[in-house]
Image (spheres, helix red, strand yellow):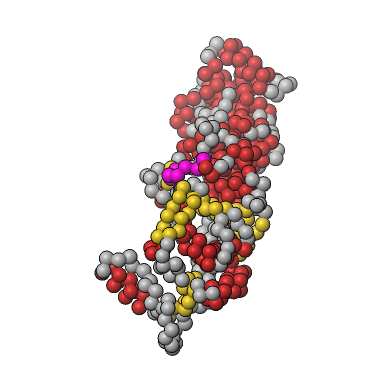
């Protein structure tokens, strides 16, 4: 039997973090077992589904590199098939028309509540043979078994047992002829030969209903694996109030997709004490048995740490390509300067995200338009002009523009002037970068064009001379 998993989001919003983790686990399980991973768009909620959300889901999957083998399939393109199955259930006596009005259903539930019973549909039309009332379009309800139990051998949670008596006859087709979620999911999983349904544990209540429909259709049930929820730092289910929950927001915030995947795979799954996993390692090591049964807290600080580890492991080429869009977003042209990958490698120890790295990289390609006000007041004094002029003359004389030559030149400047290197390095850093934080000055200057550095020093010298 070939393993087949599916990720089945509803296109009513962006691809959120919980959905991305579900997609990742489905993907890894299929890949580990040499199976197939299917993408299915569950868009039967016609009022809330929209094309923008579909594109957001596809974009998120592409950015994360979660390649699917089949799909995307759209449920709205399968309505004829769903109606066919509903008719099949009707003909076999497993479903029936229900003519209850909304008011009657409300009264039914209120009565049950008053009698301290579970508020639900009481099966009023289940066995009736009356002439249907005129002017009412019926829904179709599934005849849930009245006795017995449904046992789910959950691959994550372990055995789950639900009494059929706890389940009412759910609607499988609305009065307008559109199918409902629990019916479409069953038909799709059956037709697509899904072997493992891996999804959030908010679906546990749906699972016994879906199993009963599958059995009424004579179909084999898949293995179910319900994943615990992702929690915010307050211990509650992660939502918008906890900050960024859209996958593409993490792209905008400057995280590498491979770092986010690594963080997500560890959010509820573990392999010994290992924290960092390559893509192939994830596929080789992932098992449902190692998924935690309880919820996991999303920690932005930990995600930033993982992102930094990926910065450290990246090649200059990869980091440069990743950083480029963020440079473009702040209108910095990099084509005329040193390779962006070299700059990124110099900055990777100091940045948690690509957004931070891009802002730090600005001065490698653009001369500072202003100086840190507090630092300028302290560093740019008339006597500093001679220090910077000496350094400028030495740098201008260099034939080899590399960090070693630059450092030797600056050391000679400080020695000749009889000052500690800090007396030179601090105003030099301010002149070249506009701020007080950067990698070593020799490494920094080496990645800026020689004439550009001299021009920056010339401007700073003038500022020093004009200082009072």
Residue 458 or residue 144, whichever sits in front: 144
**Residue at position x 62%, y 48% from top?**
30
Q: Residue furthest right?
A: 399
Give the vertical position of 451 relative to 92 (above or below): above
**Image check: 117 left or right of 191?**
left
Residue 343 is situated, as x and y percent measured from the top left of the image, at 64, 32
Residue 427 or residue 344, whichever sits in front: 344
**Image check: 302 left or right of 342?**
left
Q: Quadrant of residue 214?
A: bottom right
Residue 101 is situated, as x and y percent measured from the top left of the image, at 39, 79
Give the vertical position of 435 relative to 52 (above or below): above
Tally the numbered discs: 0
**Residue at position x 27%, y 65% from top?**
116
Q: Main secondary structure of the magenta part?
A: loop
Q: Residue furthest front?
A: 148
Q: Is residue 159 magenta?
A: no
Q: Is residue 369 visible?
A: no
Q: Is residue 318 visible?
A: yes
Residue 315 is situated, as x and y percent measured from the top left of the image, at 66, 33
Start and end of the magenta stretch? 290-296
**Residue at position x 62%, y 23% from top?**
442
Residue 18 or residue 113, whichever sits in front: 113
Q: Quadrant of residue 128?
A: bottom left
**Residue at position x 38%, y 45% from top?**
235
């Amino acid at each position: 039997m070939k393993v087949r998993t599916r990720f089945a989001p509803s296109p009513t919003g962006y691809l959120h973090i919980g959905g991305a983790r579900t997609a990742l686990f489905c993907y890894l399980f299929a890949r580990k077992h040499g199976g197939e991973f299917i993408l299915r768009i569950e868009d039967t909620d016609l009022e809330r589904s929209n094309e923008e959300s579909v594109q957001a889901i596809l974009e998120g999957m592409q950015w994360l590199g979660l390649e699917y083998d089949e799909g995307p399939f759209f449920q709205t393109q399968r309505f004829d098939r769903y109606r066919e199955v509903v008719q099949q259930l009707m003909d076999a006596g497993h479903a029936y028309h229900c003519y209850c009005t909304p008011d009657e259903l409300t009264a039914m539930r209120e009565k049950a509540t008053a009698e301290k019973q579970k508020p639900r549909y009481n099966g009023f039309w289940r066995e009736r043979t009356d002439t249907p009332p005129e002017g009412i379009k019926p829904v179709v309800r599934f005849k849930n078994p009245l006795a017995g139990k449904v046992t789910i051998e959950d691959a994550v949670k372990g055995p789950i047992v639900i009494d059929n008596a706890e389940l009412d006859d759910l609607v499988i087709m609305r009065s307008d002829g559109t199918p409902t979620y629990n019916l479409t999911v069953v038909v799709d999983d059956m037709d697509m030969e899904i072997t493992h349904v891996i999804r959030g544990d908010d679906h546990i209540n749906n699972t016994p209903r879906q199993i009963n429909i599958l059995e009424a259709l004579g179909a084999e049930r898949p293995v179910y694996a319900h994943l615990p929820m992702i929690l915010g730092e307050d211990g509650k289910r992660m939502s918008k109030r906890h900050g960024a929950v859209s996958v593409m927001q993490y792209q905008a915030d400057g995280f590498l997709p491979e770092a986010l995947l690594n963080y997500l795979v560890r959010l509820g799954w573990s392999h010994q004490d290992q924290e960092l996993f390559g893509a192939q390692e994830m596929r080789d090591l992932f098992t449902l048995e190692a998924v935690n049964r309880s919820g996991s807290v999303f920690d932005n600080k930990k995600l930033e740490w993982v992102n930094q580890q990926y910065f450290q492991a990246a090649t200059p080429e990869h980091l440069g390509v990743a950083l480029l869009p963020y440079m473009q977003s702040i209108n910095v042209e990099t084509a005329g300067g040193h390779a962006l990958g070299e700059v990124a490698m110099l900055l990777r120890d100091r940045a948690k995200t690509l957004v931070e790295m891009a802002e730090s990289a600005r001065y490698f390609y653009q001369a500072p338009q202003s100086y840190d006000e507090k630092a300028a007041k302290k560093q740019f004094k008339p006597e500093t002009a001679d220090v910077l002029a000496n350094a400028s003359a030495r740098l201008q004389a260099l034939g080899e523009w590399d960090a070693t030559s630059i450092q030797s030149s600056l050391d000679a400047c400080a020695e000749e002037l009889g000052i500690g290197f800090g007396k030179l390095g601090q105003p030099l850093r301010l002149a070249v970068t506009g701020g007080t934080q950067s990698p070593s000055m020799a490494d920094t200057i080496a990645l800026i064009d020689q004439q550009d550095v001299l021009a920056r020093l010339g401007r700073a010298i003038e500022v020093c001379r004009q200082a009072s």
